[in-house]
Image (cartoon, grey):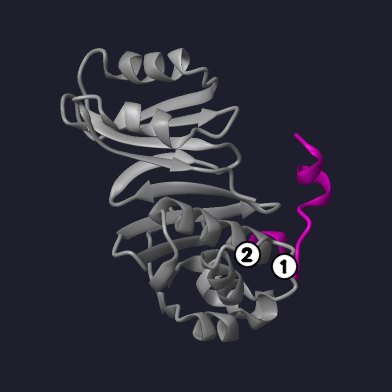
């Protein structure tokens, strides 16, 4: 437990889960996309869909997609700023199933430079979030640390090759998890590090023969 579990994040209210957490989810989705967002379709499930408007969840999600912090005083005017900045957005109600967290959201994003991505996650309380899916692949990370995401062939030595490169380049791994759909298919590695990873490190990982894609995500404020 840390101080944020007790008093919550510094934020524009009213709710740490429906407002601050929503901002952080938007920030995480923008970071995963890797470029400014041009168009967003935002699917709301459960409590986010039922009570989100009253808590400003819709405003907070759009604010996060623009890269704003949880304490940004412009959050109540996020829609106006999005329109002025050319960010197209729309909301829909979705049913993510009984197993999904009540504060679940799914983003369909298009970037200003042409990237596209689908990201899903939830606000789990106290401003904390969990990203649970990227482009249809199940995984899990919080955005509390700088994070590397890989999509790679599930074969012996794959994890060791990636971690070996990072070790040689002085990157300390705080936590690592591997997710896969089936043995010998595609897998995803989530590596949370103690320091941001620079472009040269990411290029070195991307150059490994079993790597299909790699993303670097800074810690989400």
Q: Which residues are magenta?
A: 1-17
Residue 19: image location, x then y, percent: 66, 66
- Cβ–Cβ under 8 Å for marks 2 and 1: yes
Asked if residue 210 lies left or right of residue 58, the reply is left
Q: Is residue 7 magenta?
A: yes
In the image, 6 versus 81, the foreground residue is 81
Q: Is residue 75 above or below residue 209?
A: below
Q: Residues within 10 Å of mark 2 (few under 14, many from 20)?
A: many
Q: Is residue 96 above or below residue 187?
A: below
Rendered-image quadrant of the N terminus: top right
| Image point (65%, 82%), residue name | 77
Mark-to-mark CA distance, 2 and 1: 6 Å
Q: Residues within 10 Å of mark 1 (few under 14, many from 20)?
A: some
| Image point (41%, 62%), residue name | 106
Identify the secondary structure beneath mark 1.
Answer: loop
Q: In the picture, residue 163 is in which quadrant?
A: top left
In the image, 59 versus 170, the foreground residue is 170
In the image, 163 versus 120, the foreground residue is 163
Q: Look at mark 1 in the image and give the residue it sits on.
A: 72
Asked if residue 18 lies left or right of residue 198, the reply is right
Asked if residue 129 lies left or right of residue 32, the reply is right
Residue 41: image location, x then y, percent: 38, 73
């Amino acid at each position: 437990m840390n101080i944020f579990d007790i008093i919550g994040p510094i934020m524009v209210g009213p709710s740490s889960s429906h407002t601050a957490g929503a901002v952080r989810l938007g920030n995480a989705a923008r970071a995963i996309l890797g470029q400014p967002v041009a168009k967003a379709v935002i699917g709301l499930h459960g409590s986010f869909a039922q009570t989100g408007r009253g808590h400003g969840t819709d405003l907070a999600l759009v604010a996060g997609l623009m890269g704003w912090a949880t304490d940004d005083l412009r959050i109540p005017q996020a829609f106006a700023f999005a329109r002025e900045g050319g960010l197209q957005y729309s909301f829909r109600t979705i049913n993510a199933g009984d197993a999904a967290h009540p504060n679940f959201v799914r983003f369909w994003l298009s970037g200003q430079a042409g990237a596209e991505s689908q990201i899903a996650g939830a606000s789990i309380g106290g401003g904390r979030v969990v990203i649970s899916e990227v482009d249809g692949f199940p995984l899990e990370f919080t955005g509390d640390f700088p994070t590397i995401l890989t999509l790679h062939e599930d074969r012996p030595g794959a994890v060791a090759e990636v971690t070996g490169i990072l070790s040689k380049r002085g990157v300390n791994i705080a936590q690592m998890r591997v997710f896969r759909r089936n043995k010998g298919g595609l897998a995803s590695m989530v590596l949370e590090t103690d320091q941001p990873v620079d472009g040269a490190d990411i290029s070195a990982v991307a150059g490994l023969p079993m790597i299909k894609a790699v993303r670097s995500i800074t810690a989400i404020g």
